[in-house]
Amino acid sequence: MTEKLEAVLKEDRVFEPSAAFKEAARLNDPAQYEAMYRQSLDDPEAFWGKVASELHWFKPWERVLEWQAPNARWFVGAQTNITYNALDRNLASRRTKAAIVFEGEPGDNQVLTYHDLHREVCKFANVLKGLGVKKGDRVTIYLPMIPEVAIAMLACARIGAIHSVVFGGFSASALADRIKDAQASVLVTADGGWRRGSVVPLKNNADEALAEAPSIKSVVVVRRTGEDISMQPGRDHWYHELMQNASDQCPAEPMDSEDPLFILYTSGSTGKPKGVLHTIGGYQTYTYLTAKYIFDLQEQDTYFCTADVGWITGHSYVVYGILLNGATTVMYEGAPNWPDPGRIWQLIDKHGVSILYTAPTAIRAFMKAGEQWPLKYRLSSLRLLGTVGEPINPEAWMWYYNVIGKGRCPIVDTWWQTETGGIMITTLPGVHAMKPGHAGKPFFGIAPEIVDSSGQPISNPDEGGHLIIRRPWPAMLRTVWGDPQRYVNQYWSQYPGNYFTGDGARRDAEGYYLIMGRVDDVLNVSGHRLGTMEVESALVSHPAVAESAVVGKPDPIKGEAIVAFVTLKAGHTNLEALKNELKAHVVKVIGAIARPDEIRFTDALPKTRSGKIMRRLLRQIAAGETDIKGDTSTLEDRSVVEKLKAGE
Ligand code: PRX
């Protein structure tokens, strides 16, 4: 992290949005931002009440906010349905406008208008009802990035079922854990999905998962790749068969504002992923407003976010926030560099994309592939760029700005988390100057603070500390599914009454935030969160492993690479083969995103006298530092570090 940080800190250039962009932008006046921001903090109820009234509510709220830390209730007493706002509300003026523009990896194409999407969602909502799904039931969705993933999410929301989308790259065992935790009764999956020219065997993985997850009573299978798969009579149904006879009439169920909308699992500092719970009224209001102003969504825009719907970015800014604004969202199924590194640029050219939202890891990979790829395509439709998921190094920022945006397009570097539901810190594209590497200013209603470990605010500019949020915001997570105590411990106990983000940050004299990265045992690999404990538990579940400690190491493309220090049980000889076996084992237990880049066998791990693994030392060793800095006085056996450094 230190190296990454230093690279980030070297940059001090400032870029203003172009006059042309400013002129056409929804918000373009810094004084107006300041006034709105002030009002959002001085009178949050008035501010959010006004925003929410741009949406449809079956029944109005009695109070905008009820807050007793750590429990927030937004739009108390109101009834609404997010799909009414995302679909029905758009039918009057946008019936024939493209809602989803889909591009499959093999190049197949589909456009769903708001009319089409509304109809498909109603039909699938009826299919779910036919399978016995009721308000509050959990439905797990394990699909590739195809329109059916959005249809399934929206169909759940239509009838008040809680969706839990599991990223298609997760393994059978990760899927089983998530189904069991949510106690889902229905699984929606596909025969397979395309990824780099091969088929991801989703249904086979699902079958393996279901052997361990008996709560699932019905499985709906979308035919995507035409794989030969097994269908269990009575349990498994083809999507297209069920849809054939389904009625397209399904009024949106009036839901309580605080009813759950979805669970999304994310990594924390313990081995078990957390089911982050979001509720309807606040989430819809916040994703609607953030998408509107941060992406400056306007009627003629074609918006493309490259994230998978299996992550929060896909939930909030492929599906909900974008459709709530009646905009067109591009969905792409496959890898961004398949069949060649020009694929994303070709898609932008083909569909006339005007707003692109992607991750620094992707930008660094595009950069490495060379600018000849984007130069082959017309990128003149682009007017705004965004990044998310990890700190962006200024070099990658500059490349994105010059080579992709041609110096014309502002970049929004958006900081947020699964738990925050929507973007929290960013510049507004027509309002603020941009500083590469800095996310920027807080969004409306967001009260960040940088504190030291005792909770004292740090007011010196550019001094690092922990990033906390002082007040509730509408899309804040409400709890950890099935574990309310973990919600309190994880987010609210370190700085009582304040939300602790788990990130380190600093703020400059102009109030721009720079995010330094996680301060807990969470890795950020290619913009994806992974708990070191998760990878460690996967490793020790292999019979050869006695103990393991996993740390991140700076990586030029992925941000962080995974390095695992492993001690073996006695009697293992073919160590090179075993390394590969262990890597494959982690892929099997968690999924390809968790594959260790490096495995180092060692006789012992550096521990404190109380037996705690000293990861700080391991991080330095993994990064190849020879001069181990910091306090080592608590180390139990000093020779361990010397041996590790020598690679023994
Ligand atoms: O460390 C921060 C980093 O990603 C973490 C959240 O990960 P996740 O819940 O998977 O959500 C990712 C997409 C919203 C944060 O705690 N992070 C996210 N965005 C940025 C970032 N770090 C620096 N700059 C960002 N723009």
Image: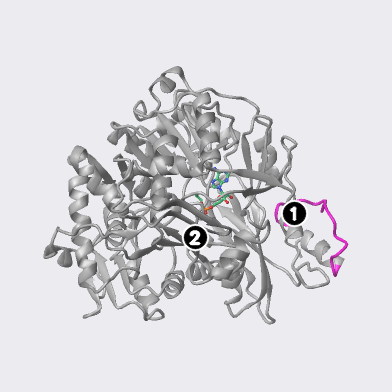
Q: Is residue 475 visible?
A: no
Look at the magenta stretch and give its main secondary structure: loop
Which element is circle 2 on?
loop
Position of residue 166 relative to residue 561, above or below, is below
Front residue of 288 and 241? 288
Q: Does the residue labelled 1 lie within 8 Å of ligand 1?
A: no
Position of residue 503 relative to residue 160, above or below, is above
Residue 86 x, y percent position in the rendering:
29, 48
- Identified at 78% across, 59% down, the residue is 645
Which labelled disc corresponds to residue 94?
A: none
Dot 2: few (<14), some (14–19), or many (≥20) neighbours within 10 Å?
Answer: many
- Identified at 83% across, 71% down, the residue is 609
Q: Which residue carries the number 1 mark?
A: 620
Span shown in magenta: 620-637
Dot 1: few (<14), some (14–19), or many (≥20) neighbours within 10 Å?
Answer: some
Q: Which residue carries the number 2 mark?
A: 478
Position of residue 217 relative to residue 148, above or below, is below
Front residue of 219 and 49? 49
Q: Does the magenta stretch include residue 538?
A: no
